[in-house]
Amino acid sequence: MSEKKHDLDGETAVVTRRKTALKTKRPKLYKVLLHNDDFTTMEFVVMILQMIFGHDETSATAIMLHIHRHGVGVGGIYPFSVAEAKVAETLATAEKAEYPLLCTMEPDDDDEDGDDDRNNEDSTGK
């Protein structure tokens, strides 16, 4: 972008302005993990995955079965503050229903390039 300005001597001068393009980094993503236990019912885990994580019944059931068979599964992948809120809401809901469901979060190591758009994805490890 340039502008013309007139000098006092009557000559024309060109002033050049540069716009610096600011590149924002995508926030680091975190996996919200649900852990299997011997007391929390499968139906309750499916309900958590639907109500808190926004999965439909089919994907919630698939994730629940993955958790049951492998001991842990990913409920969703989110920026830190969202993941933290999902963990807190899950733990509070489980405590209110008197289930010992464990929900944790960890950095998503697959997010090295930062270009993935996988928030709220069905991450069953397949």
Image (tube, rainbow, N blue to C red):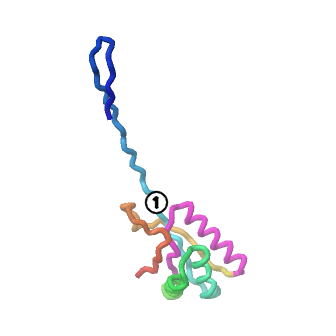
Q: Which residue is mark 1?
A: 28
Q: Nearer the viewer, residue 47 or 111?
A: 47
Residue at 55%, 84% (x, y): give it: 57
Residue at 53%, 74% (x, y): give it: 33
- Which residues lie in the magenta part? 71-98
Under mark 1, the amino acid is Lys
Q: Position of residue 95 (x, y in %)?
A: 70, 76
Magenta-span inclusion, residue 101: no
Magenta-span inclusion, residue 73: yes
Q: Position of residue 68 (x, y in %)?
A: 53, 87
Residue at 39%, 65% (x, y): give it: 116
Residue at 44%, 69% (x, y): give it: 118
Circle 1 sits in a helix, a strand or a loop, which is it?
Answer: loop
Q: Nearer the viewer, residue 95 or 44?
A: 44
Q: Residue furthest top?
A: 9
Side of 120 relative to 111 (left or right): right
